[in-house]
Amino acid sequence: MFKTANLIKKNIPLFDKNWFQTGGPAKFYAEPTTELEFQACINYANTNNLEIFVLGLGANILINDDGFDGLVIRPALQDITTKYEDIPNALPELDTESKITQAAFVTAGAGVTIESLINYCLDNNITGPEEFSGIPGTIGGSVYINIHYFKYFLSDFLIQAKVINKKSGEIKLVDKKWFNFGYDKSTLIDKNDFLLNATFFFNKSTDTQAAFAKGRSIEIIRHRNARYPITHTCGSFFRNFHDNEVTQKIAGTNNKMIFVAYYFDKLGIKGELKVGDAVVSHKHANMIVNSGKASSSDIINLARKMQELVKENFGIIPQPECQLIGFNKYPLLK
């Protein structure tokens, strides 16, 4: 039997483990470095009837000021391995322009950051993940939400993954179809299974191609930093609307205006609307920033004001993309 005495810790602060820099402590907390330790955490939670929350870099979450009354698991599985194979003739569409003949199958642990994965790949003349440069997150959190930037989704590159079941602790290998990926969506959102590692299909590139990709990575980061706040935020707080939720159309088209930031921009709240030290970013109207000593309650109250204004002016209610952690009652408008 695996001993959890040194693995499970009590009353660990979480405010320093998320981008908003708010929230109370975790009643129980662990950072498993192996699959066996992760299984031990699952067993501990089940034995003690504890709710589980798996934490990455904390870039897309808001934690209740009272904390989390359960077990927070922050995976520290950091291995990255690569296998190279010839690209089969059956898949010529993978890279027809550059005539690349080798594929790099890169497997990264759930605790590896996207930044670390990108740097590892570029250092080894592997290209593809640089499209996600500047996005904060771990492999676990990024697969969970299926991160995206313009036309690229992480699911475009994922081949298979290893997951662990929440109830049984069973570890299994699953393919891409298992995830049922969508926009900000994957099977992992059901929280019945947690990611241990993921394998991606990238290109084995030449020195010149890798150098170009490094330059592209730098430019993507520069572009993101100019457009978005980069600290003390969860990124986009609200998700875009679904087609069936809105009636307004984009001018000159038959396409629905699903972009939630459009409605916030119309209200003129960017850099103006605030509650305490929680303020709508001056860079992006769908991003809330902790400008000083905001509490999670301040952020919630500001988010509700944003919802109320959109409801009053447009008759629709934005719903959060940011995960709300440790709230016994849903704190926003439905």
Image (cartoon, grey):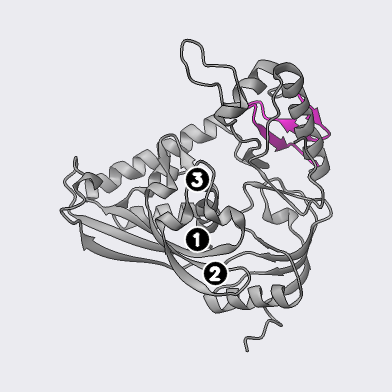
Disc 1/disc 3 C-alpha distance (Å):
15 Å
Residue 91 percent location from the top left of the image: 21, 51
- Which label is found at residue 264? none
Q: Residues within 10 Å of mark 2 (few under 14, many from 20)?
A: many
Callout 1 secondary element: loop
- Taking the image as shown, residue 291 lies to the left or right of residue 139, namely right
Residue at the spot of label 3: 147
Query: Does label 2 or label 3 sit earlier along the sequence?
Result: 3
Q: Decide if residue 281 is in sight here.
A: yes
Amino acid type shown at disc 1? Val
Q: Please state the extent of the stretch shown in magenta in the rendering.
A: 272-295
User: Which circle, 2 or 1, is nearer the viewer?
Assistant: 2
User: Looking at the picture, which amino acid does disc 2 mark?
Assistant: Ile
- Density class for disc 1 (Cα within 10 Å; few <14, some 14-19, many ≥20) is many
Q: Position of residue 319 (x, y in %)?
A: 68, 36
How far apart are labels 2 and 3 at the CA level? Answer: 21 Å
